[in-house]
Image (spheres, rainbow, N blue to C red):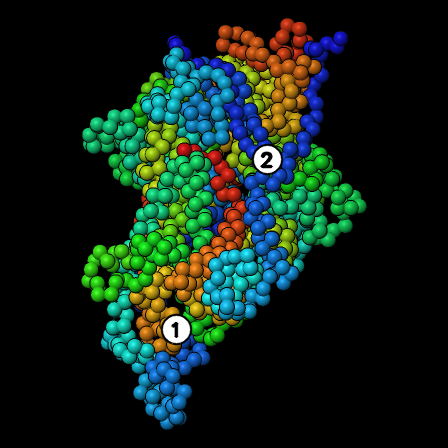
Amino acid sequence: MSDILKIENLSVNFRSEDGESEVVRGVSFSLKSGETLAIVGESGSGKSVLAKSIMKLLPHNAYIKEGEILLNDIDITSYTERDMQKLRGSVLSMIFQDPMTSLNPTISIGKQIAEAVRLHSPKMKRADVKSRVIELMELVGIENAEERYNLYPHNFSGGMRQRSALAIAIAQNPAILFADEPTTSLDVTTQLQILDLLRDIQKKLGMAVVFITHDLGVVARIADRVAVMYSGKIVEIGTAEEIFYDPKHPYTWGLMKSLPSFAEKGKELYTISGFPPSPGDLPKGDAFAPRNEYALRIDYEEMPPMFKVSDTHYAATWLLDSRAPKVLPPVRRDMNV
Amino acid sequence: MSEIILDVRNLTHHFGIGKKLSVKALDNVSFAVKKGEIFGLVGESGSGKSTVARCVMNILKPTSGEIFCEGINVLNPKEFKKNKKQLEASRQLIFQDSASSLNGRMTVREIVSEPMKIHKVKPPRGTFDAEAEFQLFYVGLDKSLLDKYPTELSGGMRQRVAIARALTMEPRLLVADEPISSLDVSVQAQIINLFAHLRCEHNCSILFIAHDLSVVRYLCDRVGVMCKGKLVELAPVEKLFASPRHPYTKALLSSIPIPDPRLERERVMEKFDYDPKLLSGKLREVSEEHFVLWGDEE
Amino acid sequence: MENKFELVGKRPTVLTESKKRRTLRGKPVISVSFILVLILACSFCELFMPKDPTYMDLYNADAAPNGEFFFGTDAMGRDIFSMIWYGGRISLFIGFFATVISVFIAVIFGSISGLAPKWVDSILMRFTELLLSIPSLLLVILLQAIMGKANVLSISIILGLTGWMSMAKVVRSEVRQIRESEYVIAARCMGAGFWRIVWKHLAPNFVSSIMFMAVMNVRSAIVAESTLSFIGMGLPLEIISWGSLLSLAERSILSGSWWIIVIPGVFLVLTLLCLTNIGNHLRKAVNRKESNL
Amino acid sequence: MIRENPFVYYGKKLFVFLLSLFILSLAVFFISRLAPGDPLVSYYGDRVEKMSVEEREWAENKLGLNESLPVQYGRWAKNALCGDFGISYKYKMEASEVIGERIGNTLVLGGIGFLLTFVLALGLGILCAYYEDKWLDKLLCRVGTITSCIPEFWLSLVLILIFSVNLNLLPGSGAYSIGNKDDFGDRMLHLVLPLAVVVINHLWYYAYMVRNKLLEEVRAEYVLLGKAKGLSKRKIIFRHCLRNIMPSYLSLMAISVPHIMGGTYIIETVFSYPGIGKLATESARYKDYNLLMLICLISGAVVILCNIIAQIINERIDPRMRESRHIEEGEVAENGK
């Protein structure tokens, strides 16, 4: 499989009255066609900005400071808004967290999907557009599509709205779909339905999915590969198995350990102490060091590079350096279930 | 059986929409919280779990039913008035969104000492400042935050300030309405620990409302599952997770994602069809302390 | 040399003080200083006025600006330079006094409406909407005609009585919003009394939106006074205000005495502009979020 | 909730309209009569002062002013229902005739001014929102703020001074030159300056409103989804955002009719333009009761009508406001999965 998307050393800064803040810092990863990459991180870790910067949907006070975005080996970093319009929807597509607000409340669902269908094939006949819309609605699991064509978003429940948003996003068979916390605002039972739907559609259309979430449970269900972000950097990236069963970065350890699902009842839950640093005021060296039990002296001075663990598994921690003391991962995998 | 601190009996609440329609937000909900236990109330959005919290706190007046808080019928206006002061001190509420439950124009110092000032309590540690400082320390915050405004704090810090405010009155019952669902994983864990701590050290009973079942499983002693305003199952947490009886509970439990790729990918979700039949009937005891809503005909 | 790879563990994060410095950037410095200078100059105009503003120097009527009359004289020979400061006093006074009355009514009315049960609220709001939909100037003219000959006080009262409606609506919606906010619910759960909630929670939170409305109200009161006086339904000629000063302007069009129109008008417009700037600055920044477009 | 039968719906509105008119007439009638002042002055002029008691009585009797107020109102209302609004004391002819002569002028000035203002405001608002924070937007905002601070009477004076007195380009008073009553071009020429004042005075207020509403709309999440599906900036503004603000803009237009009307009254006075604005101030001052009543009723009718139209727009046009029966249905279907 080839890489359809390759990000090299991407940095995104935000300007504000109080100065610059580095929200994404030197992120590199690649995406193969048809695979699902989950980006996990806490709020403020820059995961959502990362996706938006690839789509070029950043707000005006943000800009790509450096780095390259290669789409099918073509550098799109300096693409203009007009160039991007051609890519969006047809090659790159995106769905968002809140299905309530991500649909226009005054236009019927059917028309909003039709708009996406017609956008890249403007000569399509009316009837064809409509049948395509209904086909799409059925694909995303909206029953009685024909009757529901003329309904407005407020007539729909949260899950149905997210399905509609998904129908809009896949209308042009995009090669890559960015899903920005698409299930966070949904109930658990609906969440599962949407996840499974996403997986089915991905298989049918063969698209790659970049799934952004903070929920490791969701990641386990959907991801082929996982990237863990902290303070704008990818601190660890690898296949789902590698991240879940053999994590190397202390932050990943912390995340896993602090999950109540892994904890023993009655025992104190492991916590990562402190709070994430603000992106405008990052500490020197490794941003995670002040909260890291396993921080080395060098962590406070120098940013760790990406160490290779295996061909697919990389982690940015000095613990992997040959000179570092050997630390036993504190995550015990036999604890769950 | 140990002492019961909160007893909710046949609580029913209807929300009117328009002139004719009304929605049953709560339908005949009964449960009890024992002293020193953490009682979890779970359900999806719209299941009425927050309405329960608001009724318990006398924010909403339910259509019918009774709520006894340490033996005081809080829905009886006379009794409520007589014991208002005591109730206001012994029950405390923690909201989901700490950003909006703290007044943005008050400093942390003012926020934390407000309940004491309202109740004209003499601070146990001398001054209001000393007390505020102590409570902040207790919830794991630095005293340098005393003069900050809520907007300057992160979500986790704010939620701790809200808890510190509740603790100043040394409550015997803490009602926590989704206190951790807007927080990040690493901060969530800190707050969960804080709740566990409170129960152990203060012998505080907690009505813990949540939608995240893994948290409930870790933290709570007994759990009530709510669906569309009905309490469908009520059991000690181990029993509920080991042998759920109601189809809705089964569906809900099966939809918790497990953070383990191999297990999670294979897992199939239990289906639950909303059948009014399944949501009618009475709570019946199926085994010790395990109650399930069971239709009459079965 | 110490080992760089020694395990040292976490260090407590020290909360850094936010670096925000208080600067005057983006604040309406010019507008505020203009208004302050104007208020000072108007209050102490006796100290530097070259002429008696009420004295009609008929020999020098309609004189263009010159060394003696900096801004010229009007058709009755009064010195415009002196009249501007002298009249500004009355214009500003009317603006502020009318606003005080409006704010007073608006806060009381709005708070009642915001705190009252739903049906009272909706009656009160219908009432304000009704008043609001009547062109305010027409209302003022009617009231003025009914009250008879105008003086400074009567005009302030009329403007105050007709200018409170939109402010009351803002107060009411703020009060409603705050009342239903979780921090007020929290305070009620703690047992805070009515007055404590009003004083500690409601008042501090709606002051900023009131300030904006109040400044805008000063502005519209000044406009209304000058318009009324101009069309002859406000202050009579002998009470000097910017409006009555301008009421002679119509005649001066024919004589081509532009200064009678332009100079007082420029002062009026500058004052209004500065007030608008201050008001806009006070308004809560709604659009702080970045555009998605 | 099920939508009301349109007949019932509009019937209710009509009832509200008539009831409001009735209350308005009562209020104006009693307030104007309770106020100090002598209506005979406007009929007989200065002669009133020399009248004897008997003469006064006779005069009052002739004008029907000697009876008790409720009786006077009853008579007025009875006549008014038959289309007789009494005579104007000052002009000594039917009040409706006095108004009929002038209302056309006011309608032309107000109507054209109204349309121009709203069309231009919409355009200007869109322009500002499209170029948010660019130099064009900043410039327009500055200029707009300044123009909105200029009182209309002073603007009229300055325009007359410049264009009429100094440059002698445009006429500065009246609706037509003497003897050119039926000359269309001449009338138009006379309209230019008053119209300019109407438009300049109100334009920015509404343009700013459009701008702010659009800016709010542009920050909604559906804009991101629109962009993600490949829509251009222009299409998003025109097809989505504009559509969403239109209902509120239309209702705003309806509510502002009275304000623009109130403004034209002043402008008419300055330009000596023979409209009902001048009549209104005169009749109020001289206690010309019948005329005052009629003017108030007409203005009031317009005000109330506009309010009702605004209400109808709000309730009927915006799909978010339209009650929907589908919510339940959608919810059930979703949950039934």
Task: Locate residue A197: give its quadrant.
Answer: top left
Q: CA distance from mark 1 to mark 2?
A: 62 Å
Q: Nearer the viewer, residue D273 or C250?
A: C250
Kindly identify the residue that appears in the image at 55 percent across and 57 percent down.
C67
The percent coordinates of residue D268 (x first, y second) are 34, 63
The percent coordinates of residue D281 (x first, y second) are 38, 70
**Left or right side of A118 for A70:** right
Amino acid identity at mark 2: Gly
Disc 1 and disc 2 in contact, CB within 8 angstroms: no
Q: Nearer the viewer, residue C63 or D26?
A: C63
Q: Residues within 10 Å of mark 2 (few under 14, many from 20)?
A: many
- Helix, strand, or loop for circle 1? helix
- Mark 2 sits on what residue? B155
Task: Locate residue B206: give its quadrant.
Answer: top right
- Most distant residue in the right direction: B126
Could you say which disc has been placed on residue D284 in the image? Answer: 1
Task: Locate residue B93: give its quadrant.
Answer: top right
Kindly identify the residue that appears in the image at 41 percent across and 37 percent down.
D136
